């Protein structure tokens, strides 16, 4: 039972980070109906920027985190403006293909600047484990969970009460109606990309503190896609619930099934779930099924 609870807690922590990154997928999909396949590179670049500020310039973690988030926001804003805005009005597949090409370009830039060696963050959190009954939890897991919860609360309040958040929700529901009310849809698109880059960077920095940083970290972006699809690509609550489900199932698979089959099943579990979701509930658990009149 103790081992099960240990795996469960680990799954909740990792799943909460997945949920945060999946929020970026949802925001971009809601604003443009496109899937951003460069999400993993946003995650990787933000993480490397934060790590470089800490190790090369001795900037404290909190300051480095804030600078990395500002850099990520500007990166998302600039990429939307220069690379993706020309595709507004074009078929959605054109924008999706553009994000695939963008992913390759950003991956090449990361390789040129930082290489492929695994790097580790300095010890930012205490190494003294926290005992919750018979469960032993590393402080980095607790801090990661706390940061994700705070971020999700902030974004929930932002979308519910701020003028910009309400404008983003209105644009996601009906772009034409939003434009008729004087909302700049192009600006909303740019903000959505900036926020997607921010949440990806936070997720990458948290995972980097747990597992280290290398180019393979960008694969988290692809792994999180099943999270967004499971919850529903147009559902923010769905991204949170989907992240927790995938994180827990992945952790339990790694703890119980991987030793039986020799490993590797944990890595493919999100995509197994993706196949079943697409077969039986293609709009996700909380996604809205669109009905078009002919």
Image (cartoon, rainbow, N blue to C red):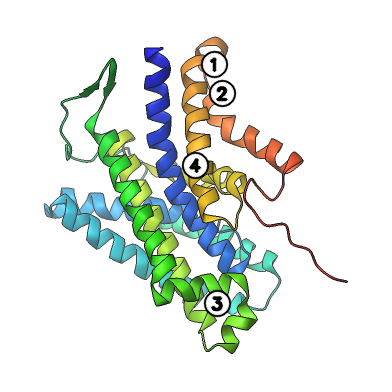
Crowding at dot 1, Cα within 10 Å, few <14 / some 14-19 / many 20+, comes out as: some
- Residue tagged 4: 243
Number of numbered discs present?
Answer: 4
C-alpha distance separating marks 3 and 1: 45 Å
Decide: is 159 above or below 12: below
Specify which label sits upstream in the sequence, 2 or 1: 1
Task: Give left or right: position of 68 versus 235.
Answer: left
Given contact means CB atoms under 8 Å apart, are the residues at marks 4 and 2 in contact? no
Write the residue at 55% across / 59% down: 36
Write the residue at 57% across / 13% down: 261
Residue found at the very far right of the displayed protein: 294
Q: Position of residue 88 (x, y in %)?
A: 62, 77
Secondary structure, mark 2, is: helix
- Confirm whether residue 110 shows in the render: no
Judge depth for marks 4 and 1 and give the one in front: 4
- Confirm whether residue 75 shows in the render: yes
Given contact means CB atoms under 8 Å apart, are the residues at marks 3 and 1 in contact? no
Specify which label sits upstream in the sequence, 4 or 1: 4
Secondary structure, mark 1, is: helix
- Image quadrant holding the N terminus, namely top left
- Residue tagged 2: 265
C-alpha distance separating marks 4 and 1: 20 Å
Instruction: Work out whether residue 185 or residue 116 is closer to the camera in this orientation and state it.
Output: 185
Judge depth for marks 2 and 1 and give the one in front: 1
Instruction: Work out whether residue 59 or residue 119 is closer to the camera in this orientation and state it.
Output: 59
Q: Position of residue 227 (x, y in %)?
A: 55, 44
């Amino acid at each position: 039972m103790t081992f099960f609870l240990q795996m469960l807690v680990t799954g909740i922590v990792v799943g909460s980070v997945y949920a945060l990154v999946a929020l970026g997928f949802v925001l971009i999909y809601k604003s443009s109906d496109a899937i951003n396949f460069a999400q993993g590179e946003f995650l990787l670049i933000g993480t490397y920027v934060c790590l470089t500020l800490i190790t090369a310039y001795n900037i404290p973690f909190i300051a480095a985190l804030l600078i990395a988030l500002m850099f990520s926001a500007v990166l998302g804003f600039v990429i939307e403006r220069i690379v993706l805005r020309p595709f507004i009005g074009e078929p959605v597949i054109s924008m999706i293909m553009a994000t695939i090409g963008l992913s390759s370009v950003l991956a090449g830039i990361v390789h040129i600047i930082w290489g492929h060696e695994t790097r580790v963050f300095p010890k930012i959190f205490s190494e003294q484990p926290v005992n919750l009954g018979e469960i032993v939890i590393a402080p980095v897991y607790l801090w990661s969970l706390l940061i994700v919860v705070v971020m999700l609360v902030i974004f929930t309040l932002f979308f519910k009460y701020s003028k910009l958040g309400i404008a983003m929700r209105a644009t996601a529901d009906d772009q034409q109606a939003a434009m008729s009310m004087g909302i700049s849809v192009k600006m909303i698109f740019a903000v959505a990309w900036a926020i997607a880059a921010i949440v990806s960077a936070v997720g990458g920095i948290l995972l980097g503190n747990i597992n280290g940083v290398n180019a393979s970290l960008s694969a988290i972006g692809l792994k999180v896609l099943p999270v967004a699809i499971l919850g529903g690509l147009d559902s923010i609550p769905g991204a949170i619930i989907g992240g927790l489900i995938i994180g827990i199932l992945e952790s339990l698979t790694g703890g119980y099934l991987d030793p039986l089959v020799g490993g590797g099943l944990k890595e493919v579990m999100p995509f197994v779930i993706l196949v079943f979701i697409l077969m039986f509930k293609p709009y996700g658990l909380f996604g809205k099924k669109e009905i078009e009149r002919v």
